[in-house]
Amino acid sequence: MFAPGTRVRVRDDWPETRGPVHLRTPHYLRGRTGTVERHLGDFPNPEDLAFRRPAPRLPLYHVRFDQSPIWPEGAPGDEVLVELFGPWLEAA
Amino acid sequence: MSGILETDSERLFAALRTVLAAKNIASADEIAERIAVTDAGSPAQGARMVARAWVDPAYRAQMLADGTRAAEALGIPMRGAPPLGVLENAEGLHHLVVCTLCSCYPRAVLGYPPFWFKSAAYRARAVRDPRGLLAEFGTELPPGTRIRVVDSTADYRWMVLPLRPPGTEGWPEDRLAALVHEGDMIGITLVHV
């Protein structure tokens, strides 16, 4: 579990290059570092649900990222707030 | 019997409804009830929540802590709906909601999304160039306002609690609610008197 305020990195992983998948981790965040805002609860893994596989409940986090290193159009101070599942995150 | 006034989607729906009933997955009545609940969702529901939050600090706190319970407290049916999260705009902080992956939208409290919410252009630009997008909608944020783009990627549905506009002191709830439009609760527009 990641506590609020923890710096985390989104795994720089591209499962879509290895076969059919259903992903909820936007491509623009892979490899990016953000800050955990809070734990939103535990939900069945959509990557399994999409294929009718048994879906373990995973912790879902709200994670905040600075806009500017991700998109050149971002103004200083602008942020992106995204729901991400625990297995996609590693301590930064 | 199929006539020219019956669309392919209606025939598909009828076939699906028959199969769901035959397999005891969902009865026709249950499906009709869900359709009625979905059709009852409208921006007027979200606007009622916003107006209540503006006049009732305890309700506002409940809404920010648990949007689903706050909606239910106003009689909005939330059974079967994904959890509702509410994000509060403040002086210096503005939220803009998008679903870059698909079209997640808090239908229980805002109804069907506006056509542009599901467009590829909105989904790409909201996250990449929110300031340019807001400008095209004619939305001018006060100088120094930070933007927090909320990409709705998983199990929650998000709505924005907009700032109460000046000049509305002492207004009753229903008059306040009439000021609030769907775009204000997505964050693409601001509430104006």
Image (tube, coloured by chain):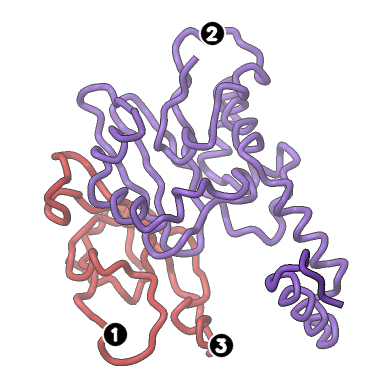
Chain colours: A red, B purple
Q: Residue tagged by mark 3?
A: A52
Name the foreground residue: B136 vs B174: B136
Q: Residue tagged by mark 2?
A: B169
Residue B100 in the image: state x and y as whole percent.
Answer: 37, 59
Between disc 1 and disc 2, the foreground one is 1
Residue B192 in the image: state x and y as whole percent.
Answer: 46, 19
- Disc 2, SS: loop
Q: Residue at the spot x=68%, y=71% of the render?
A: B9
Vertical order, B117 against A40 (above or below): above
Outermost front residue: B4
**Amino acid under disc 1:** Pro
Residue B151 in the image: state x and y as whole percent.
Answer: 37, 55
Residue A22 in the image: state x and y as whole percent.
Answer: 41, 80
Vertical order, B174 against B187 (above or below): above
Vertical order, B161 against B55 (above or below): below
Query: How far apart are the two marked residues, 3 and 1, measured between alpha carbons?
Result: 18 Å
Relative to A55, is A6 on the left or the right? left
| Mark 1 chain | A
Residue density around tag 1, few if under 14, some if 14–19, many if 20 or more, within 10 Å? few
